[in-house]
Amino acid sequence: MRLLLLLAALGLSWAQYNPNTKPGRTTIVHLFEWRWADIASECERYLGPNGFGGVQISPPSENIVITNPNRPWWERYQPISYKICSASGNEQAFRDMVTRCNNVGVHIYVDAVINHMCGAGGGSGTHSSCGSYFNTGSRDFPAVPYSSWDFNDGKCKTSNGEIHDYSDANQVRDCRLVSLLDLALEKDYVRGKIADFLNNLISIGVAGFRLDAAKHMWPGDIKAILNRLQNLNTKWFPAGTKPFIFQEVIDLGGEAISSSEYFGNGRVTEFKYGAKLGNVIRKWNGEKMRYLKNWGEGWGFMPSDRALVFVDNHDNQRGHGAGGASILTFFDARLYKMGVGFMLAHPYGFTRVMSSFRWPRNFVNGKDANDWIGPPRNPDGSIKPVSINADTTCAGDWVCEHRWRQIKNMVIFRNAVDGQPFTNWWDNGNSQVAFGRGNKGFIIFNNDDWNLDVTLKTGLPAGTYCDVISGQKENGRCTGKQISVGSDSSARFQISNTAEDPFVAIHVGHKL
Ligand code: QV4
Ligand code: CA
């Protein structure tokens, strides 16, 4: 009884840290700017069968349409209403996606833009993705409806209403981020409109939310909104399940606002992860892979069970939000695969894989002048469907990192080693490193400028394993390298420093 009371008291904290993925599914993928119809197909034909736990989708809410530059990807971060109506599809397509993905065990995580509406200079008219009227001058968004009462114009203390100084927590929360009209989240009415929006998505069957720009919202205001949310749809989730919450807070240290302020609401994005990992894999600033031995909290990251981790995201892969030169992306494919491979093998955090579209970079004075370019589009502005080549890659400018064999197979690796401890670390004192996950999996990297040839204890049962980086197990044989583990669990690894993929990963799921 006393224990129950204690649990009930602890339960007062609303937070939902469990990602609500199906048992044995441990990673989500961000299908950036994909259409709902394509995501539905991808769940059925690829994500379900390959063990992905879910999809982070681009914002589904109605947004402003920007034609100069021509429909930048970022127009979707400027809401006009909470109608489910965007270039990715309408509400009917959205419902169909959620149903079909849930039915194959792949859950949907919505990017929720609730800190603000569109930019102050958005004008007035019906240039929105569903044709809803709005007027930024009078702060009028009748399709919600919001009016001038519902914004923070009076509360912000800076001269022009914009955020200038990130060392002042008040202005970061109460002023406008790049002119985006800042909602008065302390108002009961505003909280109610946002809760209605999120509850509609929950009733359709989504599993959780990325809270965009969480740093720009007071943690207490977020909590008040979360307190109004209903439990997940029992058609697909156990009764009493709360939506998974992960909050976008960029905390690289040195600012007024820190990630830990948000732990009471759910998980938080750990931006140090990709920035530091990029430095290590690129071997900048004297970094070596051997320093990864205490990766995680040992590097000053937040607690593992609070962290949402990723190598790159839709912002920092193009120099937005905490973008830095060290961030690894598909443009550096060889290093990127190592980085994602390391992330998916390592137990720290809940992992998200990025899936991008390609654009022509154009660096002018160190900044990409094409950082605004949106997804592949038809002449009328609609997003092009994702079509799949015979070799399983994606056609056109859809990069589909999640379909790269090395990355897809490491998602499966992570599922296979779920819950296993970090074991059998080895390094050569430089950038050749290896580690195991209990008796289920083992991975080894050669990021030095010379060959690797070493015999190591893997922790795995004796037998022949297929390397899932150079190939995989198919029809009872290995299509790539084969690794034999002896009765003492040791195995010999040879990796050339010039190999396209200088790493090897084996796990019990791909044993002959
Ligand atoms: C511009 C000027 C402003 C000026 C304004 C005048 O920069 O100084 O006041 O015009 O009208 C776009 C443009 C931006 C423009 C703004 C308003 O890029 O130049 O302001 O629109 O018209 C994405 C993009 C932004 C984009 C925004 C809205 O990254 O470039 O702004 O969408 O369309 C911080 C935050 C963090 C944030 C990160 C990018 O702490 O929360 O910056 N990350 C999230 C999302 C991100 C999104 C937003 C937040 C906003 O991941 O994709 O920004 O929803 O670190
Ligand atoms: Ca705000």
Image (tube, rainbow, N blue to C red):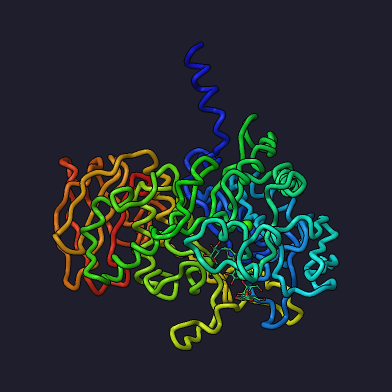
Q: Nearer the viewer, residue 246 or 5?
A: 5
User: In the image, what residue occupies the spot 29% across and 50% down?
Assistant: 465
Task: Find residue 232 and report its horizontal and vertical position in percent.
Answer: 66, 38
Query: Is residue 101 positioned above or below 70 on the image?
Result: above
The quadrant holding residue 380 is bottom right
Foreground of the two, 408 or 156 = 156
Looking at the picture, tell me which residue is in the foreground, 55 or 129.
129
Tell me if residue 400 can be seen: no
Q: Where does residue 66 sit, x and y in percent of width and height?
A: 72, 76
Residue depicted at 73% across the width and 80% down the height: 67
Residue 483, percent from left and from top: 24, 54
- Please say if 184 is above or below 446: above
Q: Give residue 495's position: percent from left, percent from top.
A: 22, 65
Number of on-image labels: 0
The furthest residue to the top:
1
Tell me the quadrant of ligand 1. Answer: bottom right
Q: Is residue 387 left or right of residue 124?
A: left
Q: Residue at x 48, y 82 (%)?
A: 367
Residue farthest to the bottom?
364
